[in-house]
Amino acid sequence: MTIATNLKQCRKAKKLTQKEVWEAANVSKSSYVAYEAGKQIPAGDVVVSLAKVFGVSTDELLLDDSERSVSEDLAPILKRFDALPSDARYQAKIALKGILFGYEQEALR
């Protein structure tokens, strides 16, 4: 479970005890221990509180490294996409959604 692993890693990197984390995040002891053990998944607002305690983004708690990175072939395309004027970016987004939707529909057949 990614969030459990990420919580432990963040806590250890910050040299915090579990108690320090649950108190700073205003979470009960039983809930935090369950989060780190992978027995319970925190609600969205709790993830935000925990991210603030650790000084990381919510993505860093919820996702593994491979989910947070962009492949080498897509990175230059995304930079070019970001440089587009807003109306062209909107049109490109619609076109891409259409392509992906069509591909996903084909895959379901």
Image (cartoon, rainbow, N blue to C red):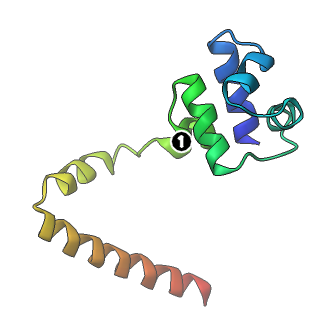
Q: Quadrant of the C terminus?
A: bottom right
Q: Nearer the viewer, residue 107 or 96?
A: 96
Most foreground residue, 43 or 12: 43
Q: On the rendered image, what quadrant is the N terminus found in?
A: top right
Q: Position of residue 59 (x, y in %)?
A: 53, 41
Q: Is residue 76 left or right of residue 49?
A: left
Among all residues in the image, which is located at the extreme bottom? 109
The residue at 70%/39% (across/down) is: 3
| Residue at 52%, 24% in the rendered image | 55
Element type where label 1 sits in the image: helix
Residue drawn at 75 percent across, 26 percent down:
22
Name the side, left or right, on which 84 lies relative to 67: left
Examine the rendered structure and indicate whether residue 22 appears above or below residue 40: above
x then y, percent, for residue 41: 77, 47
Q: Tell me which amino acid carries mark 1.
A: Asp
Specify whether 31 is left or right of 65. right
Q: Is residue 25 visible?
A: yes
Binning the other alpha carbons within 10 Å of mark 1 as few (below 14), some (14 to 19) or many (20 upward) gives some
Residue 13, percent across and down? 63, 14
Estimate the x, y position of residue 90 in percent, counting from the top left.
22, 71
Residue farthest to the left? 85
Asked if one can make out residue 64 in the rendered structure from this viewpoint, the answer is: no
How many tags in the picture?
Answer: 1
Q: In the image, is residue 67 above or below residue 84?
A: above
Quickly name the residue at label 1. Answer: 59
Q: Residue at x 86, y 29 (%)?
A: 29
